[in-house]
Amino acid sequence: MTHDELIAAGIWSGKIFEVRQRMAEYTVDGVRFGTMELETKSGSPNDVHLEKRISEITTAAMVFSYLGYEGIQLISVSRDGKPLERPDLDARLPDGTYIGVEVADVSESSQRKHESGRNLIEVAVGDLLDTDASFRTAMAECYFALTLNGIGPNRPAQIGSKKEAKAIADEIVAFVRSGAHLARPDDYFATFPAKYETLHARGAQYHAERMAGGPNFTVSEGASAIGPMHRRDEVIRVLDGHRASAAGYRSLPTWIFLFLTDTMEYFYNTIAAVEASKPRIAPFVRGYLVDAASRTLFLE
């Protein structure tokens, strides 16, 4: 899948569509970004996590586009063809200025484990639907929504390990193969029988209904109270770590892009908390903090 193909599929609209169009016209090592294959970590088309180098390039392009830059040229390899490091990328701005770009994702380790676990579940089930005819038949033309946490006021229990994520995926597969998901429960959200130990223990629920065009499998967190109000300290910890290691970077003026990956950032408003703290960014000459709600903070 390429960026151009995603644009053609119509998955973006409004302002973000303009951002994505501008990104597509950038170049990466002399090739239009829009034509670059967006490789995933696992190689699966159901994986939403990009391979590390592709992720760095995509994040850098996205931030430049948020800032309104046209015609950015990104460089990811040296003249001898080796991947650039320390900083991650180079970039030529429209006015000819040549800079380095360091890209850093900001998320707590527990959140990273959870996102990785949720992705594992979606990939495992999605790949079976694509490749295993017997599993697809068992799922039937059905919309199946897994809610990782039951309805309630408490903060959702995160997936704590790859082992737990695999157990959830295996139990979902077994549940679907049994055909139990096609029985109509009394409530809109149904709980899993005790034999599915991991799902039952965490209070996971599901909703399944026959729907033309299926099968379709989705994973959600479940309704709960909003957790911590901001991630300012995590941002500053990551920033300071990169500031300390920047002494060993290649010698060129370097910008740092910090990306808050949690989609709940719309509620946490870490951007405002970091802005009030006015953190130091030297030796970086410029920094930007971007969140999943497309808000951008200039750090100077």
Image: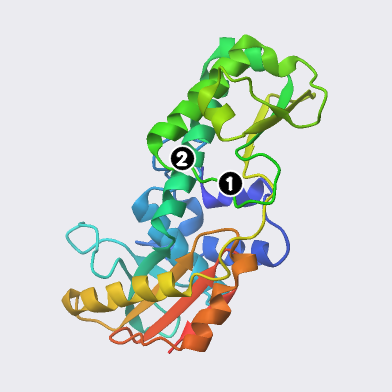
Q: Where residue 105 sits in the image (x, y, percent)?
A: 41, 63
- Residue 257 visible in rendering: yes
What percent of the width, then of the height, locates residue 178? 62, 10
The quadrant in which residue 294 appears is bottom right
The answer to which of 229 and 11 lies nearer the viewer is: 229
Callout 1 crowding tier (Cα within 10 Å): few <14, some 14–19, many ≥20: few
Residue under label 1: 5
* Side of 109 relative to 86 (left or right): right
Label 2 CA crowd tier, 10 Å (few <14, some 14–19, many 20+): many
How is the structure coloured here?
rainbow
Q: List the residue tagged with mark 2.
A: 117
In this view, 87 is above or below 149: below
> How far across and how far down the image is residue 111, in percent?
46, 53
Question: Which quarter of the rendered picture does the C terminus lie within?
Answer: bottom left
Instruction: Report the front residue among 245 and 99.
Output: 245
The amino acid type, in three-letter code, at marker 2 is Gly
Kindly tell me whether residue 145 is visible in this rendering. no
